[in-house]
Amino acid sequence: MIKIKELNIDYIEEIKSLFCDIFTNEPWNDDWSDASQLHEYILDLIGNRNSLTLGIYEDNKLIGLSMGSIMHWWIGTEYYIYEFCVKADKQRQGVGTEFLKCVEEYVKRLNVTHIFLQTERTVPAYEFYKKNGFVELNEHVSLFKEFN
């Protein structure tokens, strides 16, 4: 049985565990070995006034996350998704699409008018989002500066 639940700081250990399980493996291979950095990152996502984290559960086990925040923008209120993920063994089975639809329904009830997210063109998530109705913003550019 699939169930969607809003998560908060009380679920931080469960969130960290799933997050690491997903993002330290292919295709991301992120290095989250610094437990303190991981803890702070997850707190950044779930510990703010406007944070909204939703989890998808199957048989009472967390199998996916949508971590973001509600932002009040001039064109309407948006749900800015920072991280969206589903366990690797649940991918390509429709779980992510079902979860994304549930997220959309959930945020619409909060008067959210659109969802914004960023991903890389080179990862499978890019095609997943396009398949689920997301479009690239032609005028949007992401910029990055690293300090030495």
Image (cartoon, rainbow, N blue to C red):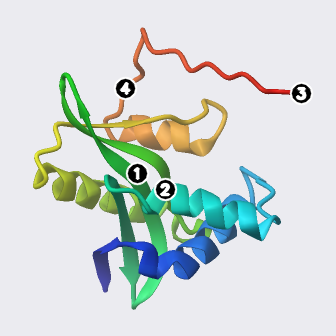
Image quarter hosting the N terminus: bottom left
Residue visible at 37% across and 26% down in the picture:
135
Label 4 vs 1, first from the N-terminus: 1
Residue 68's label in the rendered image is: 1
Residue 135's label in the rendered image is: 4
Residue type at mark 2 is: Leu
Q: In this view of the protein, which residue sits in the foreground, 106 or 98? A: 106
SS class, disc 4: loop
- Residue designated by label 3: 148
> Which mark is in front, 3 or 4?
3
Disc 1: CA contacts within 10 A as few (<14), some (14-19) or many (>=20) = many
- In this view, the residue farthest toward the front is 49
> Distance from label 4 to label 2 (Cα)?
24 Å
Residue type at mark 4 is: Val
Label 3 vs 1, first from the N-terminus: 1
Residue visible at 38% across and 72% down in the picture:
8
> Distance from label 3 to label 1 (Cα)?
29 Å
Disc 2: CA contacts within 10 A as few (<14), some (14-19) or many (>=20) = many
Is 63 left, or right, of 137 in this rendering?
right
Q: Position of residue 38 (x, y in %)?
A: 68, 63
Label 2 vs 1, first from the N-terminus: 2
Residue visible at 56% across and 69% down in the picture:
87
Circle 2/circle 1 CB separation < 8 Å = yes
SS class, disc 2: helix
Q: Quadrant of residue 34?
A: bottom right
Label 4 vs 2, first from the N-terminus: 2
Q: Position of residue 146 (x, y in %)?
A: 78, 26
Label 3 vs 4, first from the N-terminus: 4
Residue type at mark 1 is: Gly
> Distance from label 4 to label 1 (Cα)?
19 Å
Q: Is residue 135 above or below residue 94?
A: above
- Residue designated by label 2: 45
